[in-house]
Amino acid sequence: MSYNLLKGKRGIIFGALDENSIAWKTAERIHEEGGTFVLTNAPVAMRLGQIKDLAEKTGSQVIPADATSEEDLANLVAQSVEILGGKIDFVLHAIGMSVNVRKGRSYTDEKYDFTSKGWDVSALSFHKVMQSLYKADAMEEWGSIVALTYMAAQRVFPDYNDMADNKAYLESVARSFGYFFGKEKNVRVNTISQSPTPTTAGQGVKGFGGFISYAEKMSPLGNATALECADYTVTLFSDLTRKVTMQNLFHDGGFSNTGVSQEIIERFTE
Ligand code: NAI
């Protein structure tokens, strides 16, 4: 169902790799709600992914940008304002990658070059994106910026590895930049802490199958899907949430506040 919540709003969407991506579903929902946007992803992902199909479907342009490159980001911001015909109302940061996870290194056997690279891509890139927008004065008043995170920033999930530390940093950047963006430009910055979701990044986590079904059984409302995350993001980009900022917002069917569920107890009852 469409409510025209984003009619006339302009944005930038990072991280749509394929149709399972949370950013992909969000782009589709924003399009339905009347928003226009530029799609962006790392140049290498663009060759692997199907982003052009999404661009066609939503009438969008694609601008490649490595989110760790200040130069790419400055170019992306300048071009987006030009293409969209004005300042930016919404930005979605949906980027994550751990080299340690990819190479099968455990948390107690990190290779620090890998750690730095993963941190740059997954966490510092959020600061870089916001600083690029801020310095170019490219955000519209009462605009909204969202990044996606996971609860491993607060509680231990052993196989989430160094991504847990990256997410803790990402959430901190949202708070800190949210202060400056709020004070000076009336722009809000939040993170959505999403349920485990079967995407390329999600399935890269060791034991993801067990992880997602455990979360499903622990959450009173069940896991939140990628489409439901897209819906929630639309509300945060709309004018209905103008005073929500510097928050880490759990979108997890109640998982984060559940100690144990009946289903889990039953599994362990002799
Ligand atoms: P995905 O694999 O579809 O998206 C990750 C994206 O990051 C890809 O499009 C990839 O190309 C992009 N990326 C990687 N390096 C980049 C770089 N240097 N510059 C620009 N883009 C780059 O997976 P998903 O799950 O949609 O991930 C989106 C966000 O949601 C990530 O931040 C992830 O950590 C977060 N998240 C995912 C959950 C899950 O279970 N799938 C749960 C909670 C949060």
Image (cartoon, rainbow, N blue to C red):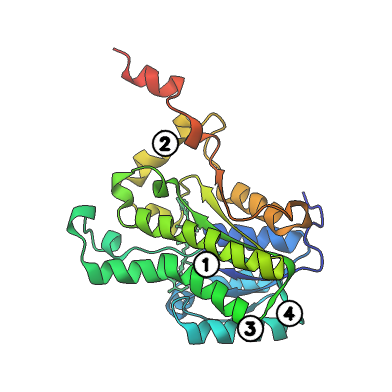
Tell me which label, 2 or 4, sits earlier in the chain.
4
Which image quadrant is residue 140 in? bottom right
| Mark 1, residue position | 15
Q: CA distance from mark 3 to mark 2?
A: 44 Å
| Mark 2, residue position | 213
- Residue at 38% in and 53% down: 203
Tell me which label, 1 or 3, sits earlier in the chain.
1
| Mark 3, residue position | 136
Q: How many marks?
A: 4
Which image quadrant is residue 186 in? bottom right
Q: Secondary structure at mark 4?
A: helix
Q: CA distance from mark 4 to mark 1?
A: 19 Å
Relative image position of residue 60 (x, y in whole percent): 68, 75
Q: CA distance from mark 1 to mark 3?
A: 22 Å
For label 2, count other residues whose C-alpha is less than 10 Å away and answer few (under 14), some (14-19) or many (20+): few
- What number is the disc on residue 84? 4
Which image quadrant is residue 267 in? top left
Q: Secondary structure at mark 3?
A: loop
Q: In the image, what residue type sits under mark 1?
A: Gly
Q: In the image, what residue type sits under mark 3?
A: Ala
Q: CA distance from mark 1 to mark 2?
A: 25 Å
